[in-house]
Amino acid sequence: MSIKNLVKTILDIEVSTEDILKLHENPQKYTNSEEDAEKLKELFLLMDLADRQEVDEDGNY
C-alpha cells in the first residue's frame, strides 16, 4: 500500500507525496490544512516515541 493511501486510511488526511521523509520534515507543504499537518506531526511524534521505547526495552542504545 502506498504512503498516500495509508495516511488517508489511518488519519483521513490527503497528502501530496509518497516520500515519508519529506512528509516528516515538512507536513505543512504536503497537506491541505494546518490541522492536517498537526495530526501528521502527532503521528510522527508517536512513532518516534514508540521507537525510543523499543530501544530502551531491548537495552540497546
Image (cartoon, rainbow, N blue to C red):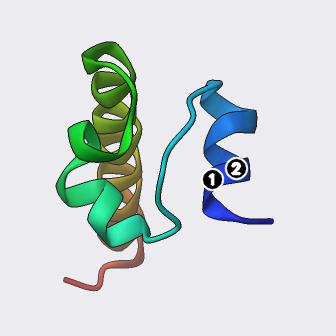
Disc 2 element: helix
- Amino acid carrying label 2: it is Leu
Residue 12: percent from left, percent from top:
65, 24
The answer to whether residue 30 is left or right of residue 11 is left
Residue 40: percent from left, percent from top:
38, 36
> Where on the picture, by quarter, is residue 34?
top left
**Quadrant placement of the C terminus:** bottom left
Q: Which residue is mark 1?
A: 4
The answer to whether residue 14 is left or right of residue 36 is right
At horizontal 39% and vertical 26% (from top left) the residue drawn is 32
- Amino acid carrying label 1: it is Lys
**Quadrant placement of the N terminus:** bottom right
At horizontal 28% and vertical 43% (from top left) the residue drawn is 27
The answer to whether residue 23 is left or right of residue 26 is right
With respect to residue 18, does 6 lie above or below? above
Callout 2 touching callout 1 (CB < 8 Å): yes
With respect to residue 18, does 35 lie above or below? above
Q: Which residue is mark 2?
A: 6
The answer to whether residue 34 is left or right of residue 55 is left
